[in-house]
């Protein structure tokens, strides 16, 4: 007998519906076609054990399992459940076959019939709804994640026998109900590291506020123990909260990568990814025979923090150049090319030299001549060119550590950041793909960052006296535009330019000499 069930396969951050046809006929042996990988081929052993363990029988005749479309490679163990239900239906062990056309089934089977969690539940649910299916059956730990999709009945199951009951008597089983908006709003009230925890370092807090307001990348340069990492970890607390649309997109990426916490339904805080410097370029960018998201995409709508930047392999750093410009990452393979979103803020930190004490106010640098520039040159010029704010961090003074006055909270800073972002949203409302000052191209820079005579003279003097490089010019204009937005000004004033100029430490010709 020939029957058809439906599953789903995830490619990139989207899913494709897969038809699983099972035919039990005369003959011997089991055949599986449709480009299955080893994990899919091994499913027949898991399926047989699960079927027998629950009082059903496995046919000893010829069994053909076809996964269509046949030209797309199928990976993973989540096809166990639709294959098992297909075999039970093809051998007349299921009575109500009409209900199978209404459901997409996904889940890995244990040998006793238990159902294990899967990856990519959210994109699978979105595709299932868009293609007109009435319901999605998947493991219970993934049910809340999939149930945020409106207009789709999601059934969380723990055992093969529950699925058999659902197929035969669908009206007796209740779907999982989740209010995505309520969950999203509740999660916004959760505590997170706050700027008020940081003593002193007002100059660095100001630089990070500017970075958050304009979507600028930043690098913090200073000796060990000066608070670079502590400040960077608090950056998400001053960024505008995720919108529901951003939360859903971020959740899709983490779901596909298998990084979503158990029983979670939404990523509702901006991601903060901090990979170790031993990471490979494939782990950073993503990859595999069926490409999976890397750290660059996992930081989408959030912050990618690279601590000790010069210690990263140069190849790892270079793969970030294109995503930082285009806000997406394309991974190509022989049979397919997948796009992963990659709109993130890069925050990097580094010591100024190998010993860490170059330009330290109290300790002497022990590095030999030329070591500072050699250390800095581990980071390529094109990558530094994409970093708008270069900030020198000095050690925290003892008086600041002992101060008892109330520090400014992240909530207060976030209010100013959101006001600046609203001004940029209005400014770029008619432009596709540009949402912040950091994304401005050359033409927009000319239109938006016009200077008066005194401002032009100040910038000219700074370029000549400080020996700033040509690449610093555009970055100074972008940052000064953000500073003006934070001040509520429609025009860039000389004081805005002056503040922006001080954030170009590494562009000075004599830095590190």
Image: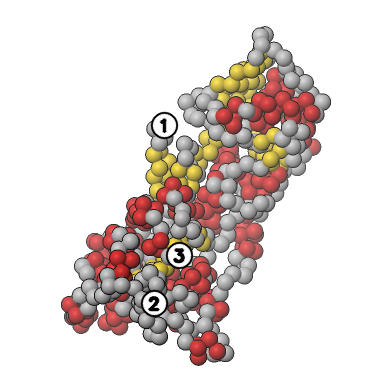
Which of the two residues, 254 or 174, is positioned nearer the viewer here? 254
- The answer to whether residue 33 is left or right of residue 345 is right
- The answer to whether residue 275 is left or right of residue 350 is right
Q: Which secondary structure lies at badge 3? A: loop
Residue 214 showing in the rendered view: no
Name the N-terminal-most of marks 3 and 1: 3
Q: State whether residue 292 is above or below residue 314.
A: above
Label 2: few (<14), some or many (≥20) within 10 Å?
some
Q: CA distance from mark 3 to mark 1?
A: 36 Å
Name the N-terminal-most of marks 2 and 1: 1
Residue under the image location 46 percent in, 55 percent down: 278
Residue under the image location 57 percent in, 71 percent down: 193
Q: Which secondary structure lies at badge 2? A: loop
Estimate the x, y position of residue 233 in percent, counting from the top left.
51, 68
Q: Most extreme residue toward the top, as rendered?
A: 26
Residue hosting label 2 = 357
Q: CA distance from mark 2 to mark 1?
A: 51 Å
Q: Where does the C terminus fall, quadrant-wise?
A: bottom left
Residue hosting label 1 = 335
Residue under the image location 59 percent in, 29 percent down: 40
Estimate the x, y position of residue 371 in percent, counting from the top left.
31, 69
Label 1: few (<14), some or many (≥20) within 10 Å?
few
Name the N-terminal-most of marks 3 and 2: 3
Residue hosting label 3 = 307
Estimate the x, y position of residue 21 in percent, counting from the top left.
61, 22
Which of the two residues, 206 or 395, is positioned nearer the viewer here? 395
Q: Where does the N terminus fall, quadrant-wise?
A: top right
């Amino acid at each position: 007998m020939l029957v058809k069930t439906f599953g789903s396969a995830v490619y990139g951050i989207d899913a494709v519906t897969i038809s699983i046809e099972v035919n039990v006929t005369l003959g011997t042996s089991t055949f599986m076609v449709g480009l299955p990988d080893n994990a899919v081929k091994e499913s027949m052993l898991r399926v047989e054990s699960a079927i027998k363990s629950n009082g059903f029988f496995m046919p000893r005749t010829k069994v053909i399992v076809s996964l269509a479309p046949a030209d797309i490679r199928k990976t993973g163990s989540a096809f166990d459940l639709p294959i098992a239900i297909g075999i039970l239906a093809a051998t007349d062990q299921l009575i109500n076959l009409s209900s199978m056309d209404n459901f997409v089934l996904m889940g890995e089977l244990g040998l006793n019939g238990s159902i294990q969690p899967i990856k990519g539940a959210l994109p699978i649910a979105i595709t299932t709804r868009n293609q007109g299916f009435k319901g999605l059956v998947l493991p219970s730990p993934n049910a809340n994640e999939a149930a945020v999709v409106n207009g789709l009945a999601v059934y969380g199951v723990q055992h093969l026998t529950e699925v058999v009951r659902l197929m035969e008597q669908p009206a007796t089983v209740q779907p999982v109900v989740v209010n995505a908006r309520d969950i999203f709003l509740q999660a916004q009230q959760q505590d997170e590291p706050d700027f008020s925890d940081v003593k002193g370092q007002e100059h660095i807090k100001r630089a990070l506020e500017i970075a958050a307001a304009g979507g600028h990348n930043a690098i913090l340069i200073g000796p060990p123990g000066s608070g670079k990492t502590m400040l960077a970890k608090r950056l998400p607390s001053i960024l505008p909260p995720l919108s529901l649309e951003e939360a859903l997109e971020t959740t899709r990426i983490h779901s596909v990568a298998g990084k979503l916490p158990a029983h979670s339904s939404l990523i509702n805080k901006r991601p903060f990814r901090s990979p170790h410097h031993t990471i490979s370029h494939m782990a950073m960018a993503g990859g595999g025979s069926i490409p999976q998201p890397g750290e660059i995409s996992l930081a989408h709508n959030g912050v990618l923090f690279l601590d000790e930047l010069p210690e990263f392999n140069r190849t790892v750093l270079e793969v970030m150049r294109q995503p930082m410009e285009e806000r997406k990452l394309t991974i190509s393979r022989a049979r397919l090319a997948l796009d992963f979103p990659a709109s993130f803020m890069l925050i990097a930190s580094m010591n100024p030299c190998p010993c860490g004490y170059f330009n330290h106010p109290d300790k002497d640098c022990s590095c030999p001549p030329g070591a500072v520039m050699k250390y800095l040159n581990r980071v390529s010029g094109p990558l530094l060119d994409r970093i708008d704010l270069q900030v020198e961090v000095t050690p925290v003074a003892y008086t600041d550590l002992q101060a008892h006055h109330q520090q400014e909270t992240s909530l207060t800073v976030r209010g100013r950041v959101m006001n600046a972002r609203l001004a940029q949203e209005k400014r770029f409302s008619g432009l596709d793909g540009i949402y912040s000052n950091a994304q401005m191209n050359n033409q927009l820079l000319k239109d938006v960052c016009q200077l008066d005579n005194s401002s032009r003279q100040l910038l000219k003097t700074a370029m000549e006296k400080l020996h700033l490089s040509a690449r610093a010019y555009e970055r100074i204009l972008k940052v000064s535009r953000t500073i003006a937005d934070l001040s509520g000004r429609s025009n860039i004033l000389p004081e805005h330019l002056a503040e922006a100029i001080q954030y170009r430490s590494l562009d000075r010709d004599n830095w590190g000499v």
